[in-house]
Amino acid sequence: MKPLHLYALLALFILFWLLLYKPYEFLGSKTKEPAIALKDFFYSELDERGERLAMRARQGVYEQKSFKVQKPTVQNNSGETLSADLGYYYDHILRLQGNVRYVGKEYRFTTRRAIYDTAAQKLTVPTPFELRGPNLLVRGRKLYYFKKIGKIEAFDIDAKADVK
């Protein structure tokens, strides 16, 4: 084999190696840095009808159209509040975890997890809950609260009411 053929074969090998395996491409860091880190902030989201979500939180990270927040509190114009230890908000869905509390005008409840759909104004509680109202105590396995129509659906409940 002539040296010219050997050099041509070697050059062809290097060319294909560079094209197929791309050793020159920089892959960057594998850890993501948060887009925005926030402390003690207020977040409000508006739609065509007005305010949809008003949330305060102790700290949070906004990244790729989603929030991960600590100690979120959601409050509406009528004074109802929904709070938890941790929350994830993405695409009009707020997922709450740890010591979830809802306080309304007539009643309040506590649970470990809840999902609030801000577009449909529906609160889903997939874990056991305790609901308290005037002369009322309800414990159950699962709860749905439809805020638009003021309707609550609760499953596998044990209720105690003081009737006067």
Image (spheres, rainbow, N blue to C red):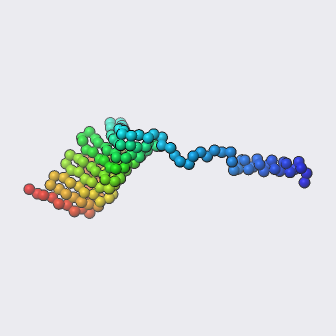
Q: Residue 119's spot in the image, x, y percent? A: 35, 44
Residue 110 sits in which quadrant?
bottom left
The structure residue drawn at horizontal position 32% and vertical position 56%, both measured from the top left corner, is 112
Q: Is 90 positioned to the left or the right of 127 in the image? A: right
Question: Along the line of sight, which residue is nearer the eye, 21 or 33?
Answer: 33
Question: Along the line of sight, which residue is nearer the eye, 133 or 30?
Answer: 30
Query: Where the N terminus falls, by quadrant?
Result: bottom right
Residue 46 sits in which quadrant?
top left
The structure residue drawn at horizontal position 32% and vertical position 58%, both measured from the top left corner, is 127
User: Outermost residue toward the left?
Assistant: 164
Q: Residue 9's spot in the image, x, y percent? A: 83, 50
Q: Is 18 positioned to the left or the right of 122 in the image? A: right
Query: Where the C terminus falls, by quadrant?
Result: bottom left
Vertical side of 36 occupied by 131: above or below? below
Q: Residue 83's spot in the image, x, y percent? A: 31, 47
The structure residue drawn at horizontal position 45% and vertical position 39%, both measured from the top left corner, is 36
- Label count reads 0
Residue 57 can be seen in this image: yes
Q: Residue 136's spot in the image, x, y percent? A: 17, 56
Vertical side of 71 occupied by 141: above or below? below
Residue 115 can be seen in this image: no
The structure residue drawn at horizontal position 76% and vertical position 47%, both measured from the top left corner, is 15
Q: Is 74 positioned to the left or the right of 9 in the image? A: left
